[in-house]
Image (tube, rainbow, N blue to C red):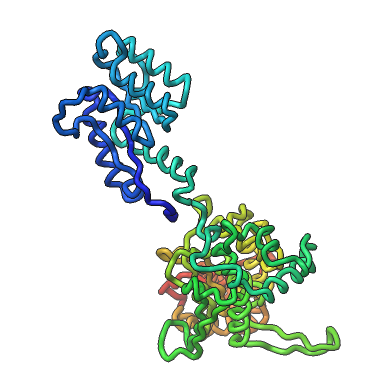
Amino acid sequence: MSTMDLKRRSIFISSVQKELSNERRALKVYIEGEPLLGRFFDVFLFEDLPASDRRADDVYLDEVDRSAIYIGLFGNEYGFPDGSGPSPTEREFDRATEKRKTRLVYVKGPDDKGRQTKMLALIQKAGAQLIRRRFTDVPDLTSAVYASLVERLERDGLIRTVPFAAAVCPGASLGDISNEKVEWFLDTAVRERKFALTVKTSVENVLTHLNLLDGGLPSHAAILLFGREPQRFLISSEVKCLHYHGTEVHKPIRSYQIYKGTVFDLVDQAVDFVMSKIVRSVGTREQGPQAPVEYDLPKDAISEAIVNAVAHRDYVSNASVQVMLFADRLEVWNPGELPPSLNPESLRHPHASIPRNPLIAESFFLTRYIEKAGTGTLDMIDRCREAGLADPDFRQDGDQWVVTLWRDWLTDESLSGFNLNDRQTKAVIHMKSAKRITNSEYQVITGASDSTALRELKDLEERGIVERVGETGRGTYYVVARRKPVKKPSNPS
């Protein structure tokens, strides 16, 4: 939210003074003390005027004329008429109507029981001309007035409440947009999504089509997507990538890189960083002329985690996206929280797509960096399962959202922490390569009896190290658990 014009405006509060004295004073104090409203408005109360020899009705009508906004607080009492005419409260309302002032009327009480006849008639007259709001107490009143005044400021163009990504990027111009980045985007979007614009479309027309201009100037999203130097305007939009030796955050750090550039550059560089550090194996040429290359983390899952972090992060935050590679996992941290309608568990099931930064998400979609169906987390889970890995973990850590992809949580270090016996350890090591084990295979590998194999496999299952597939019988087998378990101290004899 940014202010554009700090010219102060006067608000005239009209009511029967004695009946609503508390509400009048509280509203003045609130408006002039509220951080946003206090920058734009002064409040006039008749009772604040010093003694004067001017007629009271001349004073309050002049103040109505000078005001930008009329606020009428209508209670039960009508007030004392000026001679045979209407009361000051009604005269003030009529004057504001005559002068075409913005009129906001608030009626105290849930119904009209106990109101004087003339006040009821005034309420009905006001209701025929504008929308009235009811209130019961001061907090109720201030909340309603705040909403109305903010709406007025927005309508007048004095403040903007558009999302950060859609707002103009201060200090940026079309000269800060890279023609090469826009041409790459157009070429990719046409190829991947049959985008309507061609590579010959002007930069300004492209940004207009993508809703990336604000008053003819590039928005924050435009700079993040196509800026020549995005971090000159948005310092924290960089991505930090770290590679650690073990499973904890400890120095020395094997590799530490800070990447800058557009959001497309950030994703590509971070993915390349991870892929260059993880273990890869080269298969045989039995399946084709080129030997297949497999990594200990699926690239699609890595890309999805990093793209989501860059696309959905909170760009108002001073924190950066962090990609941390450990011996047993990849963690991707980004500032921000899930929308209220989602939680970590709901991401494991079909769910709606609710992007935090829809303008960035739209360009990522057009270049096929993401899909719009809300399937990103489900795809990560599927890719990890296909690779025989544990399911990803999703969690909120303070104001950071964290996605964890498990490389191999059954490392020698983690296995030692479970205090397994030799037979169980040997069976787990076998499962890591064979992907599964049956009761009979457990007996052959470890030399255990049928009852011992059953008991020790059940213990591994209860600890969450393995999962059983099938109920009973010869078709039953065990696989490495899809979720990293919480360690339990007990172990069979």
Q: Quadrant of the C terminus?
A: bottom left
Name the foreground residue: 60 vs 38: 60
Name the foreground residue: 47 vs 195: 47
On the picture, is 172 further left or further right than 366? left
Q: Looking at the rendering, which quadrant does residue 175 occupy?
A: bottom right
Most extreme residue toward the top is: 84
On the picture, is 374 further left or further right than 143? right
Residue 232, position in %: x, y? 50, 75
Q: Quadrant of the N terminus?
A: bottom left
Residue 147 showing in the rendered view: yes
Name the foreground residue: 306 vs 115: 115
| In the depicted structure, whether residue 29 falls above or below residue 191 | above
Q: Residue at horizontal 40%, vertical 40%?
A: 149
Residue 472, position in %: x, y? 65, 63
Name the foreground residue: 23 vs 255: 23
Residue 171, position in %: x, y? 50, 68
| In the depicted structure, whether residue 459 falls above or below residue 64 | below
Q: Residue at horizontal 41%, vertical 30%?
A: 103
On the picture, is 75 further left or further right than 393? left
Q: Residue at horizontal 33%, vertical 15%?
A: 119
Disc tally is 0
Most extreme residue toward the front is: 53
